[in-house]
Image (spheres, rainbow, N blue to C red):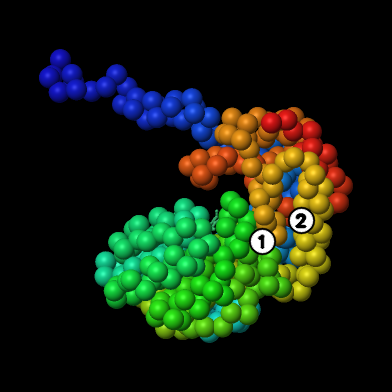
Amino acid sequence: MPTFMHHLPAMPFDSLAAELAARRDADLYRRRRVLDSPAGALAHSGGRTLLNFSSNDYLGLARDATLIEAAQAGAARWGVGAGASHLVTGHGAAHQAFEDEFAAFVGKPAALSLASGYQANLAAICALVGREDAVFADKLNHASLNDACLLSRAEFKRYPHNDPTTLERLLAGSRARRRLIVVDGVFSMDGDLAPLRELLALAECHDAWLYVDDAHGFGVLGDGRGSAAGLVSPRLIYMATLGKAAGVGGAAIAAEAVVIDYLVNFARPYIYTTATPPLLAETLRCSLRRIAEDGWRRERLVQHIRRLRAALADSGLRLLESATPIQPLLAPDSATALRWSAALAEQGLLVAAIRPPTVPSARLRITLSAAHLPEHLGTLIAALRRLES
Ligand code: PMP
């Protein structure tokens, strides 16, 4: 036997298997559930039909008939693939029209569309700041923002959740070339809002820029324009993901024309990837129209949110303070969160348990949608009231 073979472990991936086993022991192991139904209030999985309270399809647009038609017409018009990256020959009239319409809708001069929110965050943040700069980030920001801040190599300063006072101190003490404040508009696991008006005032005061990831606010808040609706400043860079309320997929960044031009020239995750299929841009144009015109979707959502919170107010269950479709129910620990999620599944409800390291403390993340009917809410409330800690 050659000598080098003595150094080989019994199996090449034993060390990975050991880490997975440790996760299992700590109730932190993840598995994917296979659904054989489209997005919507009902999910078919493993031969069962479950009421789905875990989706981010907040407006029920993911299988809206007008969007499906737009996708089909888009495929008929443009085929199914863009064929190249945007800077080569992949940037089509459909992409451009969507970008122009998105920018106009959120009230910014220009926009850029990307394949996902994760990609948008990496693209924008890594292009805008580097070694000589500093980013200031809320402690509860989404993982994709944290990854982007780390990858950018800028000095990475995190401030306590929704604490503009500490942020101001950090900004005042910074001598960096560029200062970028990075924040979720709606915090994805807590459902609360960032104080954007105050953050923007700090950006103005300290010659900084404010980057808002509005994955969970776009389409839902501000008549659909998102959590930064009404805030006017060239320092504001707005990012919406389009796989949640918009019901499709992808992301868009809206900002001053010079910022968008800069990203087209310097944002590597944008430059070195194939453009999204143009049919998606056509579908997104239709989604923008639904978001602008279908106020009833947001009204229904608000009714659901109010009803759930009122129904649990005296139940002993702890919903975090949230006026958005994200209604987190705190669990004492990961094992209880898993047990609750399993008990709800027994009763035909799909409610995801979210555990560390995704969040600091385990919870059920209940998400409401305009796709839910009043009777679906009734079933959810009755089942939650039966949970035992
Ligand atoms: N930002 C936030 C706050 C998110 O919740 C998500 C999605 N989980 C993303 C970014 C990433 O967006 P996408 O799913 O489009 O990659």
Secondary structure, mark 1, is loop
Q: Is residue 55 above or below residue 292?
A: above
Residue 251, horizontal then vertical, whole percent: 54, 65
Q: Position of residue 198 (x, y in %)?
A: 54, 74
User: Could you tell whether 49 is left or right of 270 in the image?
Assistant: right
- Of the residues shown, which amino acid type is indicated by label 1? Ala
**Along the line of sight, the residue nearer the viewer: 186 or 46:** 186
Position of the N terminus, as image quadrant, is top left
Dot 1 crowding, Cα within 10 Å, few <14, some 14–19, many 20+: many
* 206 relative to 70, above or below: below
Residue placed under numbered mark 1 in the picture: 245
Observer able to see residue 27: yes
Q: Mark 2 or 1, which is nearer the eye?
A: 2
Coordinates of residue 66 in the picture (x, y in percent):
75, 65
Which dot marks residue 305?
Answer: 2
Q: Residue at x 50, y 55 (%)?
A: 140
| Residue plotted at (34% across, 68% down) | 134
Lower position in the chain sequence, tag 2 or tag 1: 1
Q: Amino acid at mark 2?
A: Ile
